[in-house]
Image (spheres, rainbow, N blue to C red):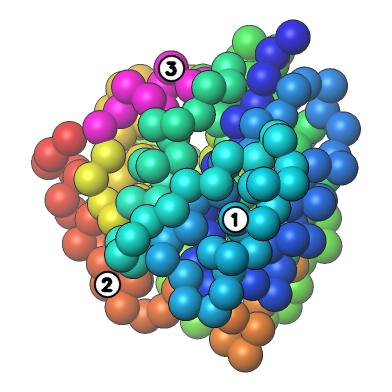
Amino acid sequence: MKKLSIVIPVYNEAATIAEIVALVRSVDIGMEKEILLVDDCSRDGTREVLEKMGREQADLKVLCHDVNKGKGAALRTGFAAATGDIVLIQDADLEYDPKEYPRLLQPILEGHADVVFGSRFLGGGPHRVVYFWHYLGNRLLTTLSNMTTNLNLTDMEVCYKVFKRGVIQSIPLKEDRFGFEVEITAKVARRKLKIYEVPISYYGRDYSEGKKIGWKDGFSALRCIVKYKFTD
């Protein structure tokens, strides 16, 4: 039986982490699941919650950073520790629903894809109405990324990305923060991998609910689009 590694980068998510782990555990995918939680030096009690969960739940691997490094760095830690045949990224908040896993896994399991991106813009289900400027920025960044990669993605910045383990563990990654999204997109495009996109739902948060990405990350993404056009 194949195994799925679910990598969850975590930073200050004490309010939602137990619920998202329960949702991940409950979804039926017909595969063994390995859940890797990477705490990026949380300051709100998240680490203590994770350590307790790790002691009580054998299917969890809890990995911890002693200093805050960013989402990209947390993902690198999780990818290196993953042992499943397929690796999936899950955010620690409740914006993305693990019930989408079968849809995300299907192109890889059927032999069509090496990499799968979710898309919040293909009409796959409920989509919370939140920030217009975030939406516009996302579409702009996706368009600029597509211009440099020659892909036709609709949602480059989406959390849900799925990889064959051999693919993600063979790609050298450098970006510590949200620039990871641009970097991995450029690098899978350069390697001529088979990339699919599937529609997903989106239950977005606002800043009062703990949303973290901001305008500075948008400028960082622009820098990464230019950088990874010319470097690997």
Q: Residues within 10 Å of mark 1 (few under 14, many from 20)?
A: some
Helix, strand or loop for disc 1: helix
Residue 217, percent across and down?
34, 71
Indicate the secondary structure of the residue bearing disc 3: helix
> Does residue 167 appear in this view?
yes
Q: Name which residue lies at 58% across and 21% down.
A: 84
Q: Is residue 217 magenta?
A: no
User: Disc 2 marks which residue?
Assistant: 219
Percent across and percent down for residue 203 are 74, 67
Name the side, left or right, on which 148 lies relative to 13: left
Q: Is 123 rendered above or below residue 2?
A: below
The residues colored magenta run 164-172
Image coordinates for residue 76, horizontal then vertical, percent: 36, 42
Q: Is residue 25 left or right of residue 77?
A: right
Give the alpha-carbon distance from disc 3 to disc 2, as whole Å.
31 Å
Q: Are marks 3 and 2 in contact (CB under 8 Å)?
A: no
165 inside magenta stretch:
yes
Please report whichever mark, 3 or 2, sits nearer to the chain's N-terminal start: 3
Q: Residue at x 17, y 35 (%)?
A: 232
In the picture of the structure, the residue carrying the numbered disc 3 is: 166
The dot on residue 111 is none
Q: Nearer the viewer, residue 2 or 220?
A: 2
Q: Which residue is mark 1?
A: 51
Residue 121: % across, % down: 65, 56
Residue 202 visible in the shown view: no
Q: Quadrant of the N terminus?
A: top right
- Residue type highlighted by circle 3: Gly
Look at discs 3 and 2 and give the one toward the viewer.
3
Magenta stretch: dominant secondary structure: helix
Q: Residue furthest left?
A: 230
How far apart are the two marked residues, 1 and 3, measured between alpha carbons? 29 Å
**Which amino acid type is shown beneath numbered disc 1?**
Glu
